[in-house]
Image (tube, rainbow, N blue to C red):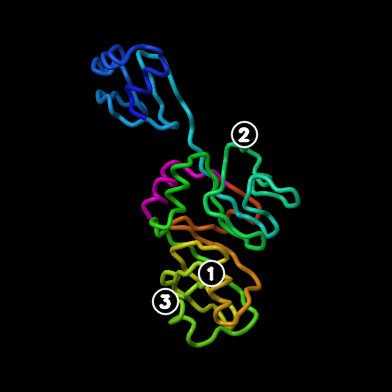
Amino acid sequence: MRLDRFLTRKTQQSNKQVRQQVDAGEVLVDGVVVVEWSTPITRFSEVVMAGERLQENTAEYWVLHKPVGVVSDTKHPHHKTVLDCLEVPNKQQLHVAGRLDLNTSGLVLLTNNGAWSKAITQASSQLEKVYEVTLDKPIPEQAEAVFEQGIYFGYEDITTLPARLERLGLTAARLTLTEGRYHQVKRMFGHLGLRVLSLHRSRIGNLVLSDELPCGSYRRLSNQEADTLLSS
């Protein structure tokens, strides 16, 4: 929303009156004097006019080390949810930015900033997601080439983007993707005749799930970390 429209709604003043105050340097957005009527205002912008604070909402960003058996949802009739893992104020305002399956552990992001979560999860972001995978049989020789070439999913009539496979053992691997389709990791290994026994997401973009955050634990991301993640 434009600044002048925001101010008329908040103060009930005319558009001419609020523009005069903007021109006079009486309006601050996020602590900075603005003189452009068209300055964009989001729900998280701090807006002060003539010394009166009109809006102060705080964007929140959390990283959770999700355990197996927890659903990436805010409500569920039968399973513990990611929100149940958090003991923070106003957690009902949070939503998941990038889901994990019930039986997958690892890094999950939660926020109350819808624009941020959309930017994180949309396909055009091309953010790398890294998974540690344990399989039921040895990985075949051609696996790296198959994943790099992309795998055709007939149901959606699409071919996956190139993925990078790193072998960690006969039946263990690290897989790096830049997309997040439905059950993608399991379906890609299924294409090779392999069944995934365990799956763990260890990284999104430049955000790594460190050993300092044990399974079931969480921490708040700073605004700088959140912004940096978008540009990684």
Comparing 221 with 135, the one in front is 135
* SS for dot 3: helix
Please state if 121 lies on the left or on the right of 100 as rendered.
left
Q: Position of residue 111 (x, y in %)?
A: 53, 43
Question: Gap in Å between the C-alphas at discs 2 and 1?
Answer: 42 Å
Any magenta on residue 156?
Answer: no
For image coordinates 27% across by 24% down, the residue present is: 37
Nearest to N terminus: mark 2 or mark 1: 2
Q: Which residues are magenta?
A: 219-232
Nearest to N terminus: mark 1 or mark 3: 3
Label 2 packing within 10 angstroms: few (<14), some (14-19), many (20+):
few
| Residue type of the residue flagged with mark 3 | Glu
For image coordinates 46% across by 62% down, the residue present is: 179
For image coordinates 48% across by 86% down, the residue present is: 142
Q: Which mark is residue 148?
A: 3
| Residue type of the residue flagged with mark 1 | Tyr
* SS for dot 2: loop
Label 3 packing within 10 angstroms: few (<14), some (14-19), many (20+):
some
- Give the residue at mark 1: 155
Q: Position of residue 200 (x, y in %)?
A: 59, 64
In the rendered image, the vertical position of residue 94 relative to residue 16, given as above or below? below
Nearest to N terminus: mark 3 or mark 2: 2
Q: Position of residue 162 (x, y in %)?
A: 41, 72
- Give the residue at mark 2: 89
Marks 1/3 in contact by CB < 8 Å: the verdict is: no
Marks 3/2 in contact by CB < 8 Å: the verdict is: no
Q: Position of residue 40 (x, y in %)?
A: 33, 31
